[in-house]
């Protein structure tokens, strides 16, 4: 029995101290095979520093041995000595059997350092050397995927997919589906999600499939997938907003609202779900419930612009103009801003007979809504009401330029020009 075998047996029997006491003897008296075997075992035990000493000695003795150099580079990487690892890997030539693995490891290290172009060059070198080794196109595809270059990643994933469904913990069909979905090719992604679900059924894949189906316009498919996810994991809170949207796309408003409320029960601090519930309540003619949801959304995030504008519209519709002013001016005082605030404040202050302030808000809103005919009409009539016919004439001229078929604006313009 060799000393290395003795060390292994002692460790397996729980005699760690006795095993470690034999390590210096292997370092001093063992042959090179024993030292490599010991380095391998120590590294596996989580002792990279001890393995490094043995491998450095062997690398100096066998400078052309790619196995030793690659192993030493892996140890350096574990010890966070990336520059030393890269220096060792650079010495492994193209004719070495370990060249491809060296390129893959170097690519990982360069990517960790943010040098993605260098990482890509290394992977390209590996691909030129071994294009049919599945791990190589997978590594290159993963790099492109991580950089958002989805169109470049898909053909490489397809190449890997021909050799198997999964590699290095990556379910290939799922990755292709995700790449297609992220690049906006929602419909093309759907069959890949179906394939991925045949391999495994999990919350993440079901959600991604449902979301992609919804984006592709297949609301019923989305409902089925989100429903399956809800049955599998009812606490998966992101599903409820999108399931509610799918029901709404199908015209099933009551089910959509019910789903939104279920989601709030799972995650009461989800501001997007609160906002959506508020909008649905308005469509279902439940203004009091809508107001409650919108206020809650603003409790969660006082600067939530869309919630502010929807609540402002609700209060304007109920002629609660003072509350509109208080809401929006308070938000602006807190540093929040949206051009819609100016338009809404102009409307509210007009109704409150605060005409000078209203005019200032309309003037400011004009900078953002000068191509919006609804705004221009409202602005023009306000100017007429205020007696500013010259300014009103310019606004109605603009409406007619934007829409020559707008007969009402044309008639008003004729009156203003008389």
Image (spheres, rainbow, N blue to C red):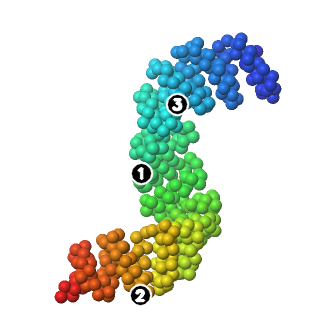
Alpha carbon of mark 2 to alpha carbon of mark 3: how far?
Answer: 72 Å
Mark 3 or 1, nearer chain start: 3
The alpha-carbon separation of the residues under discs 3 and 1 comes to 28 Å
Give the answer, above or below, for where 386 lies relative to 341.
below
- Read off the residue under disc 3: 105
Residue 119, position in %: x, y? Answer: 46, 34
- 366 or 200: nearer the eye? 366
The answer to whether the residues at label 2 and label 3 have Cβ atoms under 8 Å apart is: no
Q: Which quadrant is home to the C terminus?
A: bottom left
Work out how far the residue at label 1 is from the one at label 2, CA to CA, in angstroms: 51 Å
Q: What element carries label 3?
A: helix
Q: Which of 345 and 300 is in front in this view?
A: 345
For mark 2, what is the residue? 353
The residue pinned by badge 1 equals: 183
Point out the frontmost of discs 1 and 2: 2
Mark 3 vs 1: CB contact within 8 A? no
Query: Which corner quadrant holds the N terminus?
Result: top right
Q: Which of marks 2 and 3 is in front?
A: 2
Give the number of the disc on residue 106: none
Looking at the picture, how far across and down is residue 36, in whole percent?
64, 19
**Residue at x-position 58% and y-position 20%:** 68
Residue drawn at (22%, 74%), measured in percent from left and top? 401
Residue 208 visible (yes or no): yes
Q: Quadrant of residue 257?
A: bottom right
* Label 1 SS: loop
Q: Which residue shows up at 45% across the image and 52% down it?
A: 181
**Circle 2 SS class:** loop
């Amino acid at each position: 029995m060799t000393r290395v075998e003795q060390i292994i047996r002692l460790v397996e029997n729980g005699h760690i101290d006795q095993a470690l006491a034999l390590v210096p003897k292997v370092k001093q008296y063992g042959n090179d095979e024993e030292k490599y075997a010991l380095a391998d075992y120590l590294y596996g035990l989580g002792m990279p520093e001890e393995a490094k000493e043995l491998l450095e000695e062997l690398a100096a003795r066998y400078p052309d041995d790619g196995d030793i150099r690659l192993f030493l580079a892996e140890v350096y990487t574990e010890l966070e000595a990336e520059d030393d690892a890269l220096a060792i890997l650079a010495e492994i030539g193209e004719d070495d059997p370990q060249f491809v693995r060296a390129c893959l490891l170097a690519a990982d290290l360069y990517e960790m350092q943010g040098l993605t172009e260098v990482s890509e060059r290394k992977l390209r070198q590996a691909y030129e050397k071994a294009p049919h080794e599945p791990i190589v196109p997978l590594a290159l595809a993963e790099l492109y995927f991580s950089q958002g270059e989805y169109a470049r990643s898909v053909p490489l994933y397809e190449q890997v997919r021909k050799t198997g469904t999964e590699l290095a913990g990556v379910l290939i069909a799922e990755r292709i589906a995700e790449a297609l979905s992220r690049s906006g090719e929602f419909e093309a992604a759907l069959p890949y999600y179906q394939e991925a679900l045949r391999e495994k059924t999990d919350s993440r894949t079901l959600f991604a499939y449902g979301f992609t189906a919804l984006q592709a316009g297949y609301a019923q498919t989305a409902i089925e997938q989100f429903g399956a996810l809800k049955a599998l994991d009812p606490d998966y809170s992101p599903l409820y907003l999108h399931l509610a949207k799918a029901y709404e796309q199908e015209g099933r408003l009551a089910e959509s609202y019910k789903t939104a409320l279920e989601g709030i029960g799972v995650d009461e601090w989800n501001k997007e779900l609160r906002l959506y519930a508020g909008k649905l309540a308005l469509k279902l003619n439940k203004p009091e419930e809508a107001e409650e949801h919108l206020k809650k959304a603003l409790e969660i995030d006082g600067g939530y612009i869309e919630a502010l504008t929807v609540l402002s519209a609700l209060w304007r519709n109920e002629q609660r103009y003072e509350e509109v002013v208080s809401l929006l001016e308070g938000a602006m005082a807190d540093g929040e801003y949206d051009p819609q605030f100016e338009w809404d404040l102009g409307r509210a202050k007009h109704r409150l007979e605060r005409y000078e302030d209203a005019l200032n808000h309309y003037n400011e809103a004009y900078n953002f809504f000068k191509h919006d005919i609804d705004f221009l009409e409202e602005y023009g009539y306000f100017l007429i009401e205020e007696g500013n016919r010259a300014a009103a004439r310019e606004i109605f001229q603009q409406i007619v330029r934007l829409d020559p078929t707008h007969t009402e604006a044309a008639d008003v313009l004729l009156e203003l020009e008389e």
